[in-house]
């Protein structure tokens, strides 16, 4: 596994910890205004595509975390693919 892939796995673990803390502003540090989140699954929340850290993604996490008394995320089926020297695509499930 490449060093870049290892770094992404560490970032994802940190992300899950911040999600578990329901820290919306902390979650947004993982995104830029050109980021895209595709939200789907059995979350009880609106499936869809949310764009931009300060727009759609902020709203997504604000509503999602404010509706929960506690969150415990577990990453499953994490795959990473180095697509350029400094770019790693990561796909996973989170339960």
Image: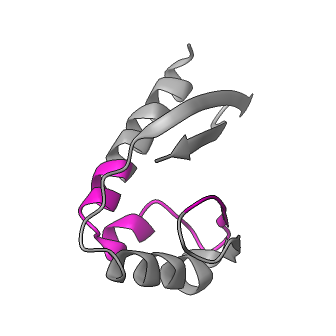
Q: Nearer the viewer, residue 65 or 12?
A: 65
Quarter where residue 71 is shown: bottom left
Q: In this rendering, does residue 84 appear at all?
A: no
- Residue at (50% x, 20% y) in the render: 3
> Residue 33 placed where, x, y %?
61, 75
Q: Residue furthest right?
A: 83
Would residue 64 be found to the left or right of residue 54 on screen? left
- What residue is rendered at 36% in x and 81% in y? 67
**Residue 82 spot, x, y in % from top left:** 69, 28
* Residue name at image x 24 percent, y 73 percent: 69
In the image, is residue 13 above or below residue 82? below
How many tags in the picture? 0
Looking at the picture, how far across and down is residue 39, in whole percent?
64, 64
The N terminus lies in quadrant: top right
The scheme the figure's colours follow is one colour
Q: Is 86 rendered above or below residue 51? A: above
Residue 80 versus residue 33 in the image, above or below: above
Q: Residue at x 44, y 76 (%)?
A: 64
For residue 61, what is the image quadrant? bottom left
Q: Is residue 84 above or below residue 29?
A: above
User: Quarter-wise, where is residue 56 in the image?
Assistant: bottom right
Q: Nearer the viewer, residue 75 or 30?
A: 75
Apparent side of residue 62 relative to residue 77 in the rendered image (left or right): left
User: Do we see residue 86 in this rendering?
Assistant: yes
Residue 58 or residue 32, whichever sits in front: 58
Q: Position of residue 27 (x, y in %)?
A: 39, 65
Give the magenta-colored segment's residue range.
Answer: 16-42
Camera-side residue of 92 and 70: 70
- 7 drawn magenta: no
Residue reaching furthest to the top: 1
């Amino acid at each position: 596994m490449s060093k870049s892939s290892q770094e992404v796995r560490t970032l994802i673990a940190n992300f899950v910890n911040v999600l578990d803390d329901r820290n919306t502003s902390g979650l947004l540090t993982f995104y830029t205004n050109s980021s895209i989140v595709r939200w789907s699954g059995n979350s009880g929340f609106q499936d869809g595509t949310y764009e931009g850290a300060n727009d759609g993604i902020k709203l997504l996490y604000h509503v999602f975390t404010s509706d929960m008394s506690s969150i415990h995320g577990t990453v499953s089926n994490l795959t990473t693919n180095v697509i350029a020297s400094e770019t790693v695509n990561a796909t996973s499930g989170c339960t």
